[in-house]
Image: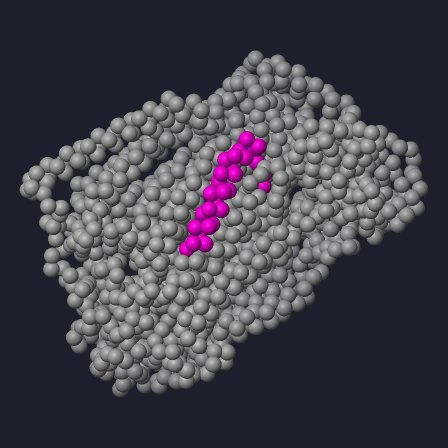
Amino acid sequence: MAIETQPERAEPTGRGPETAGGGERPWWQHMGAHTGLIGAVAGYFLGHWLGNFLGGDFARSSLSDENDVAIVLGYSFAVIGWLAGLGVFNDLFLLMRGKPLPEEPRFLGQEGPGLAKYFRFTLDHKVVGIQYLYGMIAYFLTGGLFAMAIRTELLSPNYHIIGPEQYLMVVGEHGTMMMMMMSSVVLGPFGQYFGPLLIGSKRVAFPRLEALGFWLTPPAYIILLSSILFGGFPTGWTGYEPLATQATTGMDAYFFAFGLMGISMILAGFNMIVTIINFRAPGMRWSRLPMFVWGQFTVSWLQVLAVPVLVGACYMGLTDRTFQTAFFTNQLGGSSFLYQNLFWFFGHPEVYILALPGFGIVTEIISTFCRKPLFGYKVQVAGLLGVATLSFFVWQHHLFDSGINPDMRPLFMLTTELISIPTGFIYLVAMGTFWKARIRFTIPMLFALAFYFNFLIGGISGVFLSDVPADTTEHGSFFVMAHFHYTIMGGLIFAFFGGLYYWLPKMFGIKLNETLGKIHFWTMFLFFNTTFLPLFALGMLGMPRRVFTYARNLETLNDWVSISAFCLGASMLIFLFNFVMSMAFWRQREVGNPWRSRSLEWQLSTPPPAENFRRVPVILAGPYDYGVKDALPVADLDPPPGVIGSAYAPATRGPVTREVED
Amino acid sequence: MSSAEIPLPAGRHAAEREQRRIWWLVAVWLLLSLAACLVIWFVWYPHLPPGDMTTSARHQQFDIAVLAVTAAPVILGVFCYFAYVLVVFRARPGDDSDGAPIYGNAKIQAAWIIGTSMIVLWLFVFGTVELIVPAGAGAGEGASPIWKQSGAQTVAWTPGTNDILQVQVIGQQWTWSYRYPQFGGMESTVLDLPVNTPITFHVTSLDVIHSFWPYLLGVKADANPQVDNVAYTTARQTGSFIVRCNELCGIWHGAMTSNGTVMTPVAFKVWATAVQAREKANGTLAALPPYALTYDPTVIPQLGKDLVNVVGVTGAPGYFYGPGNPVTP
Amino acid sequence: MAEMAAQPSPSAAVQAEDEAFYHESGINAAWTGSRLAIGGLAFLFGCFAFAYFYLRSLNSAGRWQGSGFVQPAVWLGTTIMVLALLSASVNWYGLQRIKAGRKSIWQIAGLFALAMGLAAVALQIWQLTTLPFPPGSSGYSSVFTGFYPVFLTLQLAVLIWLEILLARSRFIPAMSFVEQPPTVTETQSVQRFQASLSSFTTVWSFMALIAFSFWFLFYAL
Amino acid sequence: MSLTARVAALIVAFLCVVGVGVFVAVYYIGSANQLPTVAYTASGGVVNVALQEDPQNNSTTTPDWVTYYTQDPTTKQWLHTTLFSVPAGTRVNVTIYGYDGCTPLRNNYWSKVQGTLGNVVTVQQFNKNNRPLGLTTTESLINSWATCSVGHTFAIPDLGLYVPVASPNAQNSVNNLCSNSPCTPASGGAYSLEKFSFMSPSQPGSYRWQCLIPCGGGFLNGNGGPMQTLGWMAGFMNVVST
């Protein structure tokens, strides 16, 4: 095939010579995470002082010995100080003084090969992707730790190890941290890193927005954790009102951190949509777009359109708590229904924000390791678009028993069940792709298969929940819990690990240890199922969510779940060990194209050069033409002069407001 | 490259063998599905939650069973297919050839889309019927239900007739209490109900959102402040049950349970009248606010606003809102 | 980086070709981005509009506008809204002029637009500090006090964009707007400026539209 | 600095971030439950439990939070905890000193005494000079609304025990509540002395108890803050097998 004939570029190591970048100033003289930290601390105390000055004499503050205004303003100023310390606003000030922006340093080769660039406001989308990778793993591990705490408390219905309030705190932290993490765990690392590579672009549309999107996630992480210092928040990840208005100051951290993460999601999605529409290489038709990019594209739409509603809802929650508006206080003309509507109008697209990138990754993986074209490319695209569109019209299936618009339930039952049609497309494509394939059982492939296994169970249990009478039994019980853990963890996290094992060789030129990888997969797959399958039964037997105690006859089942949950945690440790050792010490080189993939990113040197492509590539064929005799190479990476020039219209006068091509 | 398959006598035999294999696959799938459905329906269904204590519980049990029977063949189909392809089409060691370049198959895709659409349509029709016929199947129906339960709205409830028993469920942090308007609006901490009687629950809350979930009764309705959420059911068996809170409501959410009993109508009448008499005697009825579908705890008839506003006395709204927001309309 | 150095670096002409390609993409990105931003903002403001209509129709505890409710000063609200509209239209007029090659007129118009926008924001802040009701006294008061801080913050952000354009325009010779500049670099910078300006105009006009619609909700409806 | 060392440094730094999260989580979750549990033992087949309600607690950072105190039976010290244990299946005599002023219930139904032996309580009022006012009365209902006269309630819902605790009567309590916690009869401030008895359940286990008065000032519906914090207005009664 054409791939083998591709010449390998230069030496494999990604880090370049040790001494490179030695000429520049030492890291601590640059603006970076350390200056950002200083700014954040200073900002917090300033804001806290200001808040005490403004809100200290509220009746609410003096009666409750708490001042939410101080906390919230502290958070806001801390974030601003953090960004200022990072140097996010430098370019803005340049522009406001009318100066032109400096060229992106990576194009001038100023971005050293060292590690310092990962702790700076770096504009290279590949750097941002790697920052996301580590950031999201940190999120994931912390959230997982809270899950362990939850299962510890549930070991006994009677003897309380961490007690009811700490239990609620842990539940809330776990849910929120995981939800915040999941929404970026694939789009962050792989989306930012491979999006531009897959569409054959040297750059993204708004690199500053992209980098800002990442640099908002560390403060979100810290702020969410800081709620523990204030006693946590008792509402779980949904933050239902008016309980949220009633809660102590820990609640502010929830609203603020979730809102912050929302903004980060919006920025990332915004940049991705514009990039995918406008920065595709010549010949990269919509019909040749890799499926992962399609998934990213649809998700970005959800992020840009649905997440603002979350930001609005979080903002309203904060004003209710600080400046005492009454959005959600029924006695004063507000409504607790309002929050439920706003939250779930975001919340349901959110679960597809989590699901769709997973679909994209596993599609890439199965096509590569089945050595076959996708079965029904258009069907898959239709599936992604259909899911994305429908997800805006189903939110009230979370509210079947709440008494909100009960006569609308048949409609929302229909829309909810309709989603299973486009989701079915995903399975049709997968099943068709496996037919007459040559299946390689590599680790990414195993994770992809596990994805289809888990997501099937999760999806089918979702059909049970869409049916109102059945939902009356299952709503708000452990059944729902099991359902969304099957779709989110069983789906997205398995896809994430698949993508990790699949793309890490490309990102770092290093591949993870295979044996440990296989052990990791099998333990994770086994214990995931032993953990969450019994939860369906627990829900059916009448165990509500977020309870610190339960009926005594459910103790055996809960203990079983807890123990296998600990084993699941242990399998994550196996991964962590493998990751750290392989990345830092073993450093097993993997150059070129180990999977013999046709996809564009694998045609580049490993890891990709600073500016991705020496020339704008010209795309000649789709990425999935496996097994086709004399198939064209996927792209011409060094097109003759003139080709690119003919790809765009000559510069026209006046403000350019042309429709985008295709 | 697709021609580079496992060496076989001839293409035609290969095709026949594959045909046979596929028929085997379909047969296995059908047999498994049939077995699964039979097991689900005849073995599992009678024991499925939430049991058959009330009409609504029966409907939910029925729905879950029907959905399970619908879902089993789908799951089994996908699993059988994957089991087949993973075994048959695995790459033998040393085989680095590619699969057959199949880009799609209009017939199969159309069939799949039609099939899934049919299933969805069936689920929708079934679900809607099952929602409307049993008057909401025990789910919260909001303040003014459009699918009502049959029965006579009466001021006084008499056993043996078709009178609807009105029960108000009041959620508060962190316990339940129940008012019986047809018995002088007396209030109780236990939920006692008559069998074979249409029952209407009026679920409301005094503070945050709770959710009223008597699991065995197959009823679930959120308790929202200032909102009357109606749910219907009719008990078919006597026995005791537990009420749980199903919506996170604060520190004691997990422990917010209370007990109830379904008893014969006559026994219920005796119990209810006895409680009413006792509460009349010790002044509880007089102390309670007049029965209403929702309550505003910030309005305290017996207590002048002045006392509520005395500094040091925390008003019922907890003074979250200062005097600038009058606590009474 | 190292492996790049190993390669023969592509010729200058070829690189110019790539640059031009991404210049085009960038200009299209400005167009797409402004439209997309409008989409996102529409959902954010829609969130508040939904709250408005939801609480109004629900009127829980009869307190959408409880007893003894006082409307915020209509003349003030109207002034703020009119300022926003004027600012947008003046800037739009300026855009038409600069398309016709009259840079200086746009600069003046832009300055006026900036001034009026800032005035609207300032007045809005002043109104918020002197409201006739506590924020939590009714549904109306909640939506009012909740919405306007968000709106004026975003107005401010968009006005920074305008300031940037004004600052940038100082360094572009007026001639460049009349005829094709000599060098490619200049041409591209003018085109970037114009693309950015028209995107700004789109967003700013949208903000004016929002200002009007919420004025209608809060004062007229 | 070699490449491997640098990567290792990066990963160590990254693990430190996680470590911080882990530490904060574990440390606070672990330390949060350090309330002492007061063990009451039966003497002569009865257990005597003594609690007090304070209008404030100036021994912590939240002086405006109302709180319960539990008396250690041996040292007679008032401990700032709401965890106590009683033997199973014995008669529990509870004595509650009500130092806190009255607050209207959200649901006046809880004015009714339920679950005590005889469904009654005995109440004795004292003025701020620790002088008894009137005689000890036996109440089956202390109306929180008609005359705002309930300070807090002591409720163990799982046992059906709901006891309104009388507040010092209004004209004595307004503006001269006990100001220094834990309060003692000598420390000034009017109070009410309430006694009742109930049978502890035969089945061992931890039974939660709470207050039903919305006494979390400054929190919506009055049910935040102290109402949702162990050691203040929420606690456990651990029933241990004898």
Q: Is residue A501 above or below residue B137?
A: below
Verify whether residue A555 appears in magenta: yes
What segment is highlighted magenta in the picture?
Answer: A548-575
Residue B257 appears left or right of A128: right
Residue A581 appears left or right of C138: left
Q: Is residue B287 above or below residue A25?
A: above
* Numbered label tally: 0
Who's the residue at 70% across and 32% down the image?
D241
Place of residue A306 in the rendered image (x, y in percent of width and height, measured from the top left): 42, 53
Place of residue D97 in the rendered image (x, y in percent of width and height, measured from the top left): 83, 41
Q: Quadrant of the C terminus of chain D?
A: top right
- Rendered image quadrant of residue A102: bottom left
Specify how the rendered protein is coloured. one colour
Who's the residue at 27% across and 85% down the image?
C183
Q: Quadrant of the N terminus of chain D?
A: bottom left
Please say whether residue A415 is visible from this viewpoint.
no
Residue C139 appears left or right of A509: right
Between residue D8 and residue D153, name the one nearer to us: D8
Please say whether residue A627 is visible from this viewpoint.
yes
Q: Give the dominant element type of the magenta stretch: helix, strand or loop.
A: helix
Who's the residue at 23% across and 63% down the image?
A284
- Rendered image quadrant of residue B296: top right
Between residue C26 and residue C173, name the one nearer to us: C26
Who's the residue at 79% across and 33% down the image?
D42
Place of residue B142 in the rendered image (x, y in percent of width and height, measured from the top left): 52, 35
Place of residue C219 in the rendered image (x, y in percent of width and height, measured from the top left): 54, 56
Verify whether residue C210 appears in magenta: no
Between residue A575 and residue C39, name the one nearer to us: A575
